[in-house]
Image (cartoon, rainbow, N blue to C red):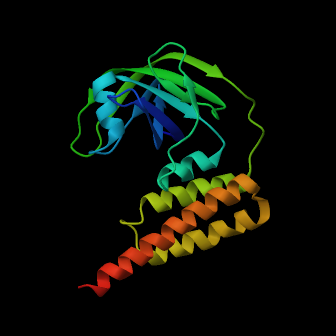
Amino acid sequence: MMIREVIVTTLNADGSVHIAPMGIRMTDGQVTISPFRPSTTLDNLQRSRTAVINYTDDVRAFAGCLTGRYEWPTVAAARIKGQRLQVALAHIEVKVERINEDELRPGFICNIVYQETHAPFQGLNRAKAAVLEAAILVSRLHMLPAEKIDAELKYLEIAMEKTAGPEELEAWDWLMEKVRQFRLQEAAGEGMV
């Protein structure tokens, strides 16, 4: 089953928008969203039973969410109570039909109630893929060995050097700063033992 990297937007209890990068699965016309426990996305899906799947090629949204930059402009969804990203090339509005319970990652099986395209896809850029892969690595800093992360980032730098534009460079810088901060905190923690 193919995983698609998207931005999922849900509404918090106070009506504010929660934005989270996530891999979703599409099967037989349904969307499966599987957030980790605990997470705000999981809580919001359980409460509201709705979400918006945002397809965007602005990789700053992915990198931003992983580096504490959650303020992305949104606009009202068309058929559900929710918000979509303004930078979305397309979006899908979904309602939860059922939940496959799991201790680590329950699966929210959702029906598509509306979808819309907002802008054309302008083609592939290797730097966008590199930023997305780096964002996934940053989300796993606490789980993967530093040597593996460093080796993969070194390889991804090749695509950045060859094809990155201003947006990709900005997103990459945010992620590299997050890696530096993590390593400093890790070193400080080891020094205190």
Quick one: quadrant of the C terminus?
bottom left
Q: Residue sitting at 54 percent across and 68 percent down?
A: 177
Q: Residue sitting at 58 percent across and 26 percent down?
A: 91
Nearer the observer, 126 or 20: 20
Total count of labels? 0
Q: Position of residue 11 (x, y in %)?
A: 40, 28
| 148 lies above or below 23 | below
Left/right placement of residue 161 relative to residue 117 reads right
| 53 lies above or below 57 | above
Nearer the observer, 68 or 92: 68
Which quadrant of the figure has residue 74?
A: top right
Nearer the observer, 3 or 47: 47
Left/right placement of residue 42 relative to residue 8 reads left
| 62 lies above or below 29 | below
Q: Position of residue 123 (x, y in %)?
A: 77, 42
Left/right placement of residue 33 relative to residue 137 reads left
Q: Residue sitting at 48 percent across and 61 percent down?
A: 138
Q: Position of residue 71 (x, y in %)?
A: 53, 42
| 19 lies above or below 165 | above
Q: Position of residue 92 (x, y in %)?
A: 54, 24
Which quadrant of the figure has residue 95?
A: top left
Q: Is residue 28 visible?
A: no
Q: Residue sitting at 43 percent across and 76 percent down?
A: 183
Q: Is residue 62 visible?
A: yes
